[in-house]
Amino acid sequence: MKKTIRNALDDGIKLLRDNKVIDAQIDANMLLEQILQMDKVNIIINGNKEITEHKYISYMRLINIRAKGKPLQYITGYQEFMGLPFKVNNNVLIPRQDTEILVLEAIKCIKENNITNILEIGSGSGCIPISICNECENVRATSVDISIEAISVAKQNAVTNKVDDRISFIQSNLFEKVDNINNFELFISNPPYIKRNEIVSLMREVKDYEPIGALDGGEDGLYFYKQISKKVKELTNEKSYIFYEVGHDQSEEVKEILEYYGYTNINISKDLAGINRVVSGTMYK
Ligand code: GLN
């Protein structure tokens, strides 16, 4: 039986809804856009046109993958962040809109203090240093990740976004392979922060598909905040700024960690949903 583009879209939405995909309509549209290489408006305008059997089958194959729980971004291989395009695959966390708040707060500090040298811990897709370098032309960044697969994705994203001449990505367990830590003026991280025993209760899209190493923050979810805060204190002897993204209920605990290690000017910023999302502080020497 012949199918129109509209029929295909409706079949896709129905299958996603039947499988409890939250944004069924958006996701079905995005996958059809990918298969037909058409934007949303053209899909509507051409709704009554026939879709070839081959394209219909390819489309429903992607719909079935999404219906089983694979995040849309790992199927399309793409996520936008701070208005820039990022390639993603299952070796990197999908950049979240919440993280834009972290980036914006850091950019404010960079501009106010003429900061030129920053270190990011946990590159993932590279979205944080890439979007900072894109906004601040005098900044050079170093970014570390323990995962060589993540580093490979982040490097490609730096090239796509034309900031690869100002970012070095290093495979390193935290600070192990980083020289001259003292030269960095600002440290930034969106570390893994989920409590280990809570990972099983996350959405299937996250727990079954996103890299566990990007999620697991140890027993209390605070392992990386403690490690990074301690190391920055120990390894620097100039004034340093520190910026963290935190889990929805972690801002007070992370503030206490920073206070414990002697950071001052501690500031907490909210995300668009009104949740405390960014904790920052300053280490004076
Ligand atoms: N920096 C990356 C991001 O914010 C990766 C973070 C992570 O893997 N925890 O998306």
Image (cartoon, grey):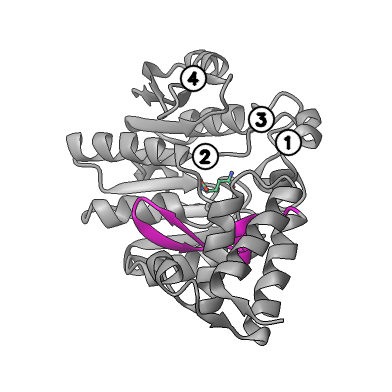
Q: Earlier in the sequence, mark 3 or mark 2?
A: 2
List x then y, in percent, for residue 66.
69, 59
Name the amino acid, label 1. Answer: Leu
On screen, residue 81 versus residue 123, left or right, reads left
Residue matched to label 4: 258
Alpha-carbon span between mark 4 and mark 2: 15 Å
The dot on residue 223 is: 3
Name the amino acid, label 2. Answer: Asn
Q: Residue at x 56, y 82 (%)?
A: 50
Name the amino acid, label 3. Answer: Tyr
Alpha-carbon span between mark 1 and mark 4: 28 Å
The dot on residue 202 is: 1
Mark nearest the camera among 1 and 4 is 1
List x then y, in percent, for residue 44.
43, 66
List x then y, in percent, for residue 214.
65, 46
Residue matched to label 2: 190
The magenta span reads: 69-89
* Residue 118 visible here: yes
Alpha-carbon span between mark 1 and mark 2: 18 Å
Disc 3 to disc 2: CB gap under 8 Å: no
Q: Secondary structure at mark 4?
A: helix
